[in-house]
Amino acid sequence: MKIVLPVSQKSLIQWVSQATGISSLGVKVRLRGNDLHILCESPECPQRWRTLLDLLHALQHTDLDALTKNDQPSIYQVFVYGRKKGENQPQWCHQVFLNQLDRHLQEVEQALITDAEKSHRTGGGGALILSNESLARQGNPEAIARYLSETLSSFGIGVEVKAKKQQVTLENPINQNRLLIYCQSSYTPDPSLIAEPVAQKLRSLKLSGYQDAVIATQVEGETDFDWMLRVDLTPPEIMLKEWGRWGDVQAIAWILNAKLCDLTIKITATLKESTLHLFCSPANPKATNQIPDKAQCLSAILPQLQALAPQGILAVTVYGHKTTDHEPAWIDWQSLPATEHPDLAVSALELASAGDEPAIIFLLERLLNPDLDIRLKTGGTRVLLLRKGDLLHIMCEALVCPSRKRVANKVTDFVKQLKIVEIAGVRIYGRRAGNKEPFWNYGVDFTNRQRLVPEATPEFAATAAYVGELLTTEANEPVLRPDLTSQDIQSLFAEVSQDWGARIKRWLLATQLFAEKEQSQEQQAEDNGWRVALVWGLLGFLLTLQSDWILGYITSRLVLETPKITNTPPKLSSAEDETQKLQRRVFFTNTSSTSGNEVFNASGFTQQENESITRGKATATAILLAARSQMPSFNVRQLDEQLALYKQRLAKSGQPPDVLIIGSSRALRGIDPTTLSKNLANQGYSNIDVFNFGINGATAQVVDFLLRRVLKASELPKLIIWADGARAFNNGREDITFNAIAASPGYQQVSQKASANEDSNNSPTTPGSIKPEQSLKTATNTDNNYQALDEWLNQALANISTTYHQRDQLKSLLNKALKSLPLLKNNSTIQPKKSAYPEQDAFELAVDFDGFLSVPIRFDPATYYQKHPKVTGSYDNDYKSFQLVGEQDTAIQEVLKFCASKKITIVFVNMPLSAEYLDSVRKNYEQEFQQYMLHLAENSNLIYRDLSLIWPEANENFSDPSHLNLYGAAKVSRKLAIDPMIPWPTK
């Protein structure tokens, strides 16, 4: 099979063939990151030094970057292999650094001379090849790039390094520079894969004059960076001194061992109370009888300790002993600066308990970095601290985002042990170094806080300055394809035109108004039966026309006999009478004053409208708005009305609400926006606008469709409260609500708009990549054609028919005739079905202008189950074939991704359930749902709050076993308002 090579590889192969004299069929090249691999093979293995000499001479006069694509990273080193044809492994390999070609030439020429003299020396007397590491230590960006490419090229990642001068600021007082490391590859590498190896290589260089380094990855052909990472380049010596000043014993031992390394003396350290004990012994384990010199040890140790002045350490005791002896040969005791300065005598733990923030940061970093060696190599986990009110906010960041399981409990227990005055709780966050927003958060309150003020995630200014200007974007130049020729462009347009021609042809055939030009003879023979069909069709038309005339004559005679109109109202059935009484009672209750206050207040102005009146007016307004809306129906009346109310809210206020409540009927009845807004105002969040967009039967798919398809980005709030439970995520049951929406004209219009946007943004797709929305659009167009044809035929027949305009009278006539038959006389007296719960039915439509459904009924099992069957979990269709993997899971994943991209905070509230509802079967499903949501919250930005079991026995808070009434909704709203884990928006 013939393989077509890229243009860049063709030119490289030709260049290698010309340089070495080896046939182009025996040359293979491969580009990986910043490395060029060249394989030379022939019937006899090519001579190593002769081949290298030819290549090196060619490299001196050739710019390899000119032979590759413009978007290919620069080549820093070349690997040359020699292999005999037919063998799998090369016989020799040589690495060539392109910045040291002269040294390589000297090495090769010396090797050729040695071979000529038949000497066994291997390059003796040749030039010394400097490693990339030694060159990178000098701080040259190009040398650093070559050094990093040794690691990253194996992952197929190209590297480019630049140095950026930094302005003098409080965080950068000595004007240090920043390294900008650009990584380019054909894929998006995982940050955890390359973060620590690259950080270790950078920190091992011990660069001077650099504050930090920023790593940014980019996929070839794209203009935006996938992710950025910040690496702290603070030298290990400075890190050790910072911890040593705080009295860290391990850091002090590292510093002293580095100082006494030349004396071959090893030090171990321990701290007892406020005295540091240092044990000096020979570093060489074989020197068992050697005793460290006391004068040398003290002269090296004491100046270091005096300069460090460790916090909380008053004195030091130094011991000298042999390796094998436990008894010291000599002892010396010295006081330290803490004895003279009272501020240094206080330990770091005491300072932290008093609320000293630098001491708390040190102790937390020491807690999260138990291995000092790893911290010095990678920078470790850094801690940022911010105190707001009675809460302590702690940000933990590292090259790889610290795990919440590993960090949260440790930090919480430690801060709790400190017993800091006026600190009632802690909020912990985790993120990757270089990011501004946290990946996860965790909070604990140590005491029962009388006033819980919810706090949003604070901005930690220590690194926020880095985020905004980590990288400077290059000029936005158009991305061109220099490898495309005019013939390629013409062939592309030809393929596109052919593809669209085939699509139009298929669409015309789908209308059934057109047929293929060439048909088989058998099909033509079958078409000869059209005469028979025409005869029978005319007979059927004449019979229909005659029947229409006869029925029209009969109905017209009946219409002439107009009945007399009486003023006696018809007698209502018991069910209708009860319903009308209840509606009158509800109306007069809502419109009458219960307190006796007049309509006008003392100042003469009208009082505020009664809340019950407002709630009563919203339903009629929603119905009217939905009827006038230009948006087609979604086949779900409540969705149409709620959407109409929401659009009216947006038109009046000009902006979306601050908080949007979504979910099924459990959200619709379970959270009162008015109560929530009032209680948030009591907590210091004034003028928070809340709207309840609950929809009966809404599942995760319905919520996903509403947020991502129905509402525009400008109509979305800052915070979404998703109130629901396990039933909305069950993939085993039929999603009746979403299926009804999917079959609606509103869904078709939304899908058409989405398809139009995708078609305008994307290039023409191949037939195999057509999305479901595109196929739905084609099917919709076909259905519209049929509907237009059907309407035209109806209008034409209506003008001819004599009974069409009197079809209602004909229907009533046939109904009376059928009821007069003997078989149906006994069934004609059946009473209309009476509502099992007329009070609840009357309140089903009582939605207020905030979208909330206020149900005042209190759940009483003794009377409820007399009117409603008691269904156990085993026979509950909502839990049928319960499983959490499927379309609903995909929907919530899409919602979380969408909210993260729009920077919308989403909180899921598992709504309360009664003990009557939670039997053993439902409890098992609810526990499974709990684990599912906790796992989802750990791996995303979702905030999960569980209220399912707060009142299992409080039936007075429920209207039925699984829905809250207005009293339970008020309690839930108040509880959410004081929840410290919900970041309420501020104005």
Image (cartoon, helix red, strand yellow):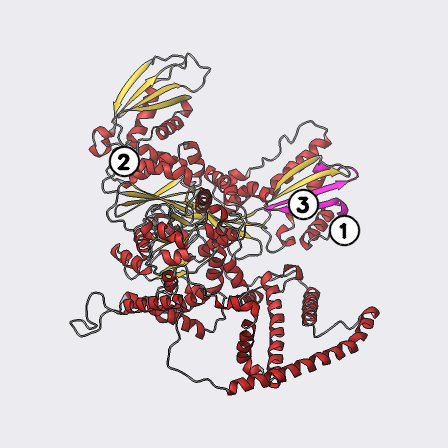
x then y, percent, for residue 582: 34, 66
Left or right: where 499 falls relative to 677: right
Q: Where in the figure is residue 203, as x and y percent of width and height?
A: 45, 39
- Which label lies toward us, 3 or 2? 2
Q: Circles 2 and 1: CB distance less than 8 Å? A: no
Q: Quadrant of the C terminus?
A: bottom left
> Mark 1: which secondary structure?
loop
Q: Give the residue at mark 3.
A: 57
**Looking at the rendering, which quadrant does residue 573 occupy?**
bottom left
Residue at image location 69% in from the left, 35% down from the top = 92
Q: Does 57 sit left or right of 878 as displayed?
A: right
**What residue did someone put label 1 on?**
2
Q: Compared with residue 543, is residue 424 higher up or lower down, i.e. above or below? A: above
> Range of the magenta residues?
19-48
Residue plotted at (44% across, 65% down): 638
Mark 2 vs mark 1, foreground winner is: 2
Q: CA distance from mark 2 to mark 1?
A: 72 Å
Residue 524 vertical position relative to residue 340 in the rendered view, above or below: below
Q: In the figure, 433 relative to 812: above or below? A: above
Q: Where residue 962 sits in the image (x, y, percent)?
A: 40, 51
Three-letter code for the amino acid on which mark 2 is drawn: Leu
Residue lying at the far left in this picture: please name it.
Answer: 602
The question of residue 44 being in magenta is answered with: yes
- CA gap, disc 3 to disc 2? 70 Å
Please name the residue that numbered disc 2 is placed on. 418
